[in-house]
Amino acid sequence: MDDPCADLDPAENVQLRCGVCSKRFIYLGMGQSLVFLVLKVWLGISSGSRALVAAGLYSLQDLASTGIAAIGLRISIRPPDRHHPYGHGKIEYLVVGFTSMMILLALAAISITSLATIFEEGAPGEEPSYVALWVALLSGVSCWLIAHYQECAAEKLNSPALNSCAVQFHGDVICSVAVVASVLCAKAGYQALDHIVAILEAVDVVAASGKVLASAIGGLMDSAADDALLEKLRKAAGEVEGVLAVQRVTARWSGQTLFSQIEVELSPRMTVAEADLLRARIRRFVRLHVCARGETLVRVKPSPADADVPAPSVKEGLSQGASVFCMRPRITI
Amino acid sequence: MSNASKECKECGKWVSVLSLWGGFGLGAVQMITGKLSGSVALSIDGLRSLTDGIGSVFVLAGMTLASLPKDASHPYGHGKAKFLSSAVIYAGLVAVGALFLFESTIVSLSHWTRVPSKMGGVVALLSIVANYVLYNYNQCAGRHLDRPMMLSNSHGNLIAMVSACAVVTGIVAARMGYPIADPLAGVFVSLMILGASGRHWWVSLGHLMDRAAPAITVEKIRSVASSVRGVLGTGTVRTRLIGENLWVDLDILVSSDCSIETANSLAAEVRGRLLSKARRVEEIMVYYHSIEAGTASE
């Protein structure tokens, strides 16, 4: 499928449009989860497919986590205030942590139930009907569409909470595929496979949630941005005319916002007013070429070398194919 | 180092160990006695002591991780590990508290007629005394060694004393002919667990969200920075807690004609003065701006 955001242009426009798109698909995801929760549990029970009932519980999970993500995203875009001078972006990591914990608990329960059923039930259960197969197929396709759009918006907006939702919907796709396989196997006479598939589904989604949780913990622990991004920041600052050297660059993510600190060396003869202008230019350059949604603190230091030393020119890397957005490594399953 | 501070350090060490293992030991005794004497409230109080002990282990683990030095992956240090471990454990304790509340409410509503024996009351009294002793030692060592963790522990001892008082009251009232008083005391203890854990959890989440230091601290930072000769004012002051220490981003305003060399030495002086005067400030990044730019941005 084509990238739904491929034709979008300039930074603010993309931010706005992707923001609208993300909201739309969050609410669509909630609606879809609610519909399929009812359908899967009802049809799972009536058609005798345990895997479909388990898949219904994933839909419940999707519903809860997208609801929490919607609230988290709403809070995360609030401007900084007296109590939160760095903004509210970190709530996205808390949302991810909360939803991942919920998934882990729910899936552990499902796995235990399925294992108990395999060992306790002597007689084979009821054979699932083809209705379960069609519902699973429908759910899989819709989840895949939602996950695709959410993933796109998460990538453009650098949103961990949206990414977490996308991972969940991806998990739902795998889950639906597994249900289809299990119904077919049950029809072929392998009843126990239904339980085994449910457990495998659980393990798979647990692994994905674990990855998302690990990235959220990294965000909460103020882990450094990746080296490529730091290098981009260094190059962007060095590109500005008047900057003699770039000393130290640190950056951390706070939800969708990148907080970076750049230490630059300027001519010692420069006045503070001139340094202010240069600082504004560096910030604008970083905003244009590295990260549209971020805050850059520029620390100015007088260069120990003579003022007439020409500014180092770092042209490569930025002039060609410079990204308007900073991309963080994505977690996909 | 004076003899008194050496004594305090020694005292601080064994008080920490005693608080941790005392919590486990007391919890086990309370739970066993609660079952033997038939006191619901004492059993719940015992579980509270045990979960306190487990919580302390988690917090200590978090603090050990938090004390690791900065590295390339964590340029701001590992201080947030403390809040992360606290957030996880207190979320668990909130769940446990809710479970206790549910259980004790069910018992209360089921027309409880069992009267607990005197032994339960004696153990609850013992818990009050033990927590009172620990409270005093934690307060003393915490204040002398300037350890917020110990002061927080002393607050925990205070809560434990209040809940043990509720247990004693419940057992005495039950023995005086009101058997429902014991499970009702259990409800009270559960509510205390919920309240205390919920408060700690909320504070941990706040720090994970980069909550700012109190306004009084920010004002102090502003006044210290402004006291440096040549600094015409302060702009934005942003603070956040990492572990037990503050990280500060401070904008100072200087004359626009000032050379950056002079402004840099002013910034260094502000930084040095703040680091020496402000308590618990680990890192200060001072950014200087011209007074016109500062006024415009404000």
Image (cartoon, helix red, strand yellow):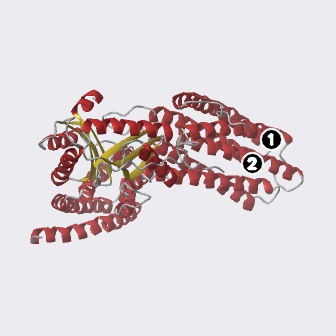
Q: Mark 2 points at which residue?
A: A51
Q: Viewer-proximal residue, A200 or A263? A: A263
In the picture, measured across the screen, residue A146 lies left or right of residue B72, that is right
Determine the residue located farthest toward the right in the rendered image. Answer: A188
| Amino acid carrying mark 2 in the image | Ala
Quarter of the figure with residue A279: top left
Say if residue B204 shows up in the picture.
Answer: no
Q: Which of marks 1 and 2 is nearer the N terminus?
A: 2
Which percent across, then down, holds residue A29? 64, 34
Horizontal side, residue B196 vs residue A224: left or right: left
Examine the rendered structure and indicate whether residue B265 appears above or below residue B145. Answer: above
Q: Which of A192 and B171 is in front in this view?
A: A192
Q: In this view, does B63 lie to the left or right of A90?
A: left
Looking at the picture, do discs 1 and 2 lie on one chain? yes
Local crowd size for mark 1, using a 10 Å CA cut-off: few (<14), some (14–19), many (≥20) = many
**Residue A44: horizontal and vertical position, in percent?**
76, 42
Quadrant in the picture for the N terminus of chain A: top right
Q: Which chain carries label 1?
A: A
Residue A67 x/y as whole percent: 55, 35
Work out whether residue A37 or residue A304 is closer to the camera in this orientation and state it: A304
Residue contact at pointers 1 and 2, CB within 8 angstroms: yes
Q: Give the class, few, some or many, for how many residues have Cα within 10 Å of label 2's Cα (few <14, many ≥20).
A: many
What residue sits right under mark 1 in the picture?
Answer: A132
Say what secondary structure mark 1 lies in: helix
* Helix, strand or loop status at disc 2: helix
Rendered residue at 88%/50% (across/down)? A187
- Number of the label disc, if any, that sits on residue B52: none
Q: Going 61% across and 28% down the picture, which residue do you hit?
A: A24
